[in-house]
Image (cartoon, grey):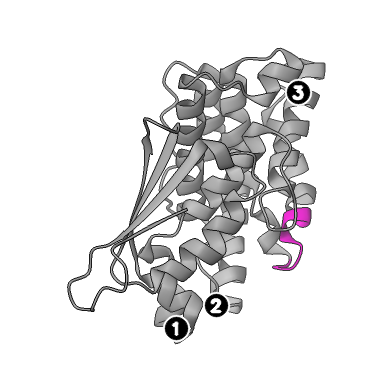
Amino acid sequence: MSHTAFTVPFRDNLKLKRIQDMINEDARLLTYWRCANVFAIDRMGYSDHGPTHIKIVANLALRLLRIVVKRGITPSVVKDYKKTPEDAEVIVVLASALHDLGMTISRESHEEYSLVVSKSFLDQYLPPLYGGEDAVIIASEIMHAIISHHKGMKPVTLEAGIVRVADALDMEKGRARIPFSAGRVNIHSVSASSIEQVRVEEGRDVPIVIKIRMSNSAGIFQIDELLRGKIRDSGLEKYVQVIAEIAGKTERKIIEKFQI
C-alpha cells in the first residue's frame, strides 16, 4: 500500500536520519498508523490520527524543541542524563511517531495502550543507535512523552511538554474535515473547521510564538478550550505566546485578536 513518506528535517543528526529511514521501511508501523485511522475516523468519526497527523506532530515538535534549545533552554535528557540535544530530538520525534498507536485499541486511555504497542518498536529502533543503558534511558523518556501527551497527565520533562503541545497544534481545518463532512456538526467540528493556518515562529519576548489564523470566531473554542488545556501544565507556559486572528471577511468580527 502506498503512503506519504515520513520526513523530518534531520539536519546533521544522523541518529534522527536513521530513525526516519527505519520508520519508512517498517511496514508494521505503517500498518498500525493505518489501523489507528480506521478506528478513529471510520468507526468513531474522530479526526485524523494516522500518518498525516503523525508527520505534522513530529515536525512541529522538532521545530519547538529547536527553538527553545536555540534560546538556551536545556532539554531534560541533557540536564538529567548528560545526553545531547540531538538525543532530545530523537525523543520528541519517536514519541510523536508512536503517541497514538493506542488508538488501534481504544480511544479511552489510548495513551496508556500506546505504551504497550510502542514497546516492540522501541526495542527494534533504539539498540542499533544506542548502547544498552542509553537505549533504556531514551526509551524511558519517550514513554513518558507518550503517556503525558493526553489531558490529565502532567509532563515533567521538556521533551514531553513539547510533544503534548505539538499534538494540540495539529488543528488546521484539513484535520477537522473528516468529522465535519461526515455530518458531525457540533462546536468541536465547527470550531476546528475555522482554523485556517497554524504557524510556529521564534519570538522576541518569549521563545515561541504560535500564530493562528481563523476564518471566523468559532475557532476561539478550539484555541481556548483545547489548546490552552494542552499548554497548561506542559512546562512550556512561560515559553509560549499564542496569538489568534480572524481573517474572514463574511462575519461581523466579534474580536480581531485573541491571545493566551
- Please state which amino acid type lies under the numbered disc 3: Ala
Q: Is residue 43 left or right of residue 157?
A: left
Inter-mark Cα distance, 3 to 1: 43 Å
Could you say where residue 209 lies in the image, as x and y percent from the top left? Answer: 40, 41
Identify which residue, 157 or 203, lies in the foreground.
203
| Magenta region | 106-113
Which mark, by number, is residue 155? none
- Residue name at image x 61 percent, y 37 percent: 94
State whether residue 18 is above or below residue 46: above
Q: Indicate left or right for 87 with 69 as reference.
A: right
Q: Is residue 173 visible?
A: yes
The tag on residue 45 is 2
Q: Amino acid at mark 2?
A: Gly
Amino acid type at image mark 1: Ala
Q: Nearer the viewer, residue 5 or 40?
A: 40
Q: Residue at x 38, y 71 (%)?
A: 193
